[in-house]
Image (tube, helix red, strand yellow):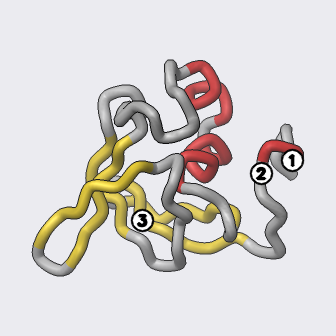
Amino acid sequence: MEPHPEIFEPYDRLIEITLLGEKKLVPENNPILRCLQYLDMDKISEAELCWNGDCIDCQVWIKNGDKEKALMSCRTNATEGMDIVRLSDNLA
């Protein structure tokens, strides 16, 4: 069980995403940023992020066909099979 379940949106299962080439299991129905926090609570909790989309410090890039698409990780839910190929410096 994750150490702080109250910070996550309710979920029934974990979904698989690819993060920088590695398969990871993260909670469904949660923004990418919360999923990154699920994977590394201390690192993401201590990062200087606004958590509301006012900055672009939590930007990630996903594989979108042959291209990359930039997303705000605090405003975009993770989806099954999502392939995150790059992270902003604040998340790396």
Q: Pointer 1: residues within 10 angstroms few (<14), some, or many (20+)? A: few
SS type, badge 2: loop
Query: Which residue is identified by label 2?
Result: 8
Q: What is the spatial separation of the Cα atoms under label 3 and label 1, in whole angstroms?
A: 23 Å
Residue type, mark 1 in image: Pro
Instruction: Answer whether labels 2 and 1 touch (C-beta < 8 Å).
Output: yes
Which residue is depicted at the point 13% across and 69% down? 67
Query: Which residue is identified by label 3?
Result: 18
What percent of the width, then of the height, locates residue 7? 80, 43
SS type, badge 1: helix
Q: Pointer 3: residues within 10 angstroms few (<14), some, or many (20+)? A: some
Query: Which residue is identified by label 1?
Result: 5
Q: Quadrant of residue 84?
A: bottom left
Task: Give whichever of discs 3 and 1 has the lower sequence position.
Answer: 1
Q: What is the spatial separation of the Cα atoms under label 3 and label 2, in whole angstroms?
A: 20 Å
Q: Pointer 2: residues within 10 angstroms few (<14), some, or many (20+)? A: some
Q: Which mark is residue 48?
A: none
Task: Give whichever of discs 3 and 2 has the lower sequence position.
Answer: 2
Q: Quadrant of residue 10?
A: bottom right
Q: Is residue 5 above or below residue 65?
A: above
Q: What is the spatial separation of the Cα atoms under label 2 and label 1, in whole angstroms?
A: 6 Å
Residue type, mark 3 in image: Thr
Residue type, mark 2 in image: Phe
Q: Is residue 25 left or right of residue 55?
A: right
Which residue is depicted at the point 42% across and 38% down? 58
Q: Is residue 58 above or below residue 80?
A: above
Which residue is depicted at the point 69% across and 63% down? 27
